[in-house]
Amino acid sequence: MNREPSTSTPKQKLDQELKSLHFTYQTEVLKRTHPSSWGEQLRMFWNYEIEIPVIPAAGTLTLIAVILFLHPWSSSVSHNPEQFADRGPLIEAYGNTYWKKDYERAVARLEDKTQD
Amino acid sequence: MKIRLKIKHLAGLVVVAALIFILFREYVIPRMELTAAEEGFEQGKVTGKEKLLKLISTAEGSKKWELISKYVIPGTPGLDEQSYDVVVGPDSTEGGGVDRSEPVKFDDSEKLPLLLDYVRNGPADKSEYGTAASGLARTFYVKGNPAEAVAILKQAEERIPQIYGFTRLNLAIQRAWLLNFAGEEEQAQEIITGLMKTEDKIGSLDLTARLVTMRAQFLAREGKLQEAVDIVGHTIRDNKSESGSTGNQADQVSRVWDPIGRLTALSQQLKAASRQTNLASTVKGRVTRSDGTPLAGVGVFLREKKDVTHSLLDAEPYLTVTNSKGEYEFPVVLAGIYQLYAGFSLNQIDGWTWPVMPGDWIDLNESKHLVKDITLRPLLDLISPVNKQVIKGDSIDFQWEPVQGAASYSLEMGLEETGLTGLSIRSGIQDTHIQIPVTDLYDKQTGITSHSNSENVMIPDPNSILGFSNPKATYSWSIEAYDAKGKLLTRSNGYRLNSNTLGALPLLQIKSRTLTDADRLLLGGKLDEALGAYKQSAKLNPSDVHSVRMLIKILDALSDDREERKKLAEEQLPYEKRLAELYPSADNWFRVMIYYYRHNDWEAFYTAYKEMEKYKAPGSDDTYDRSLYATVLLKQGRLAESVKAFEHVMQDDRSHRFVGNYLAAALLCGDSFASVQALARKYPEISFTGETYWEEMILQLEKEARGSADYRQQVSEKIRWVLSGEKKLETWLKSTHESGMKQFVQTLAHVG
């Protein structure tokens, strides 16, 4: 069997093994490394890798979430006592009719005054 | 710590987050908002109502109808419903129907578009549909648009599927009712006559009764009374077994909640109307505030004698509501005696009062067209003493705000501890202040309240016995203002529901005297020991007014059965005479007078009566005293004088409580049955203990007298037996077959 002399360097060996492969994407690569058109730039941006610090980002996200989700019904939870019609029940005292709470408040004020 | 990622992945995350956000906003949050709004609405928060409105406006399809039927329709009374916070009438004020926690209600302008949408496009096969249509029609009517109200009902009737006949019929009756009010009588009649043809298919006795009542009213207006009687009678016969009514007519009439009972009463009323000059009248008027502001949506009710003793029923025949101009009208009211009642919302009545006088009856037997306005006036404000002011002097200066047009005022007081109110202290006060000596208050007869103990024995309340003589008690006071004709203008008592109307509390304490040992025993509930102590004091000091007064009151409180009362009355008399001499007043002499009245001691009666007259406050109601006086004249056989005295009393006493005795006096005088019957008609007895048909009874006497020569003599004899308390009367009542005379004599025995 005729054996070829193994005189080839690793470089030659590699060249030979890669002989059947031809790189034809130079332009694409160039486009990506040096984008010229708008689309090319967009694509580069799209694949741009960024580093995000976890703690500040999570904090900001939570804040946004809180604002977005809690805001809509904050208005329905009212703490203004004037908006409560709950003064009942009605009571009758010596011919007059009062809301029980109003009446009790008025009587309590009287008690305070008499104690002073 | 940092993470690395590409922009496109970041964008992806943002998109996912946005999708979640949209999902929340559009679906999850609205669900949560609905829950929150429902809770808020139920707790009465205004914001809850706004949220609900917003939700309803954004909801679609069945969800929307569900929300409307759950939250809007229930708060909307229909044309045939009487739902008012306060119902006021001459003899009662009733806080009915108020949901005491007062949830936020939708107002008409908020409800209207929703109900309109529901009635036009909502599910007509749901049970709420009829209520919604009726409520909407009512809203339109109250807003002054009866034509639209009629159109709504018609549209609703057409949309309701045939199988829901009850609701359709109910709406049709309401439509006829509305048309009648709107002056479209012919159309109203047409509907009613059309419905009458299908009467046997109605299947609801309530609706049948309403239908027949309306038909009968229309016929009465046309003067076709017999036809009306026939139709009503026919319906009663057809449905009697169904309603389960048993017993006689009088029993049936008293069953006010039962349609057959109502129809029986109607039939009687129609027959009675046939004796009157006019069968049916129109009653109308306006409901306004005293500044002229009309009040829309006020319920106005013309109530028959038999109905004023119970709460308002939807089945009563004359119920209506005011329109946007505050106007109301009853186009056909059968002849009879009525009281006008009105139903208000808390907003309408807060700080205002309708000054209607007790015993204000409307007699429609004579007037054809009656205009009766209802004017609300602002409550009167009290100046002093208020807020539990302590009185230590010999007199109390009461002072209040003047009322425009008032000619006189009356002062009333109450004992807070016992719940006693409305005790008349002075009337005919010309000024806006008055000084009342505390001794006058001590002398005031307060009435004795009792409560039952654990063994169900009634225990008199010592506070009510001590009355105004208790330095530890709190007292209330109130003022009523009258015009020159004695008509009530306004009062200080009423609904005080906000900081502007609340005012000062009308309370005071009277510490001008200190408690005696006997008083302490009394307050400690030891009535017998207290009585002994007061007797002792009265014996040691004959001019000890307080002890004499207290022992009379304790004897009053102790006499709880008839026999005992007689015995105690004997024991009381010397003290009563002593009190009347030590502290002469109309009340104290009245007690002496009534003793002699009951014991048939006429000379002593006249003496006490004369003394009493000396101390009578000018303008006070003395019709009862004068009636007793006239009765004594009758009992003595001084007939001409008695008739004359009764004639005067009848003109002042609108209840005509003693008219039976007047008729007896006239009969003894030999007046003809016809003239006595005329008197009975002129002065009908109106009382809460039940109706007394004197006119009917005289008619019966006349019928029985025909063909019996000594009948008049018999009647006179029996009347004398009643007046003298003759024992033979009992035997005669058991054996007699003359039912007319028996009824008259029995009723006469209970006059007064």
Image (cartoon, coloured by chain):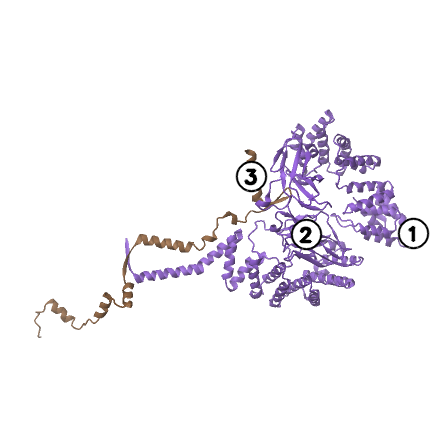
Chain colours: A brown, B purple
Q: Quadrant of residue B162?
A: bottom right
Q: Is residue A101 left or right of residue B560?
A: left
Q: Residue B326 in the image: x percent, y percent?
A: 65, 56
Q: Amino acid at mark 2?
A: Ile
Q: Name the element at disc 3.
A: helix
Frontmost of labels 3 and 2 is 2
- Disc number placed over residue A108 in the picture, else none: 3
| Placement of B525 over or under A32, stated as above or below | above
Q: Residue A49 in the image: x percent, y percent?
A: 27, 60
Q: Quadrant of residue A46?
A: bottom left
**Is label 1 on the same chain as label 2?**
yes
Q: Name the element at disc 2.
A: strand
Q: Name the element at disc 1.
A: loop
Q: Quadrant of residue B332?
A: bottom right
Q: Residue B683 in the image: x percent, y percent?
A: 80, 49
The residue located at (86%, 54%) in the rendering is B703
- Disc number placed over residue B1 in the picture, else none: none
| Placement of B544 over or under B81, stated as above or below | above
Q: Residue B408 in the image: x percent, y percent?
A: 70, 42
> Given the current orientation, which residue lies at the most extreme top position?
B540
- Disc number placed over residue B709 in the picture, else none: 1
- Residue corresponding to mark 2: B374
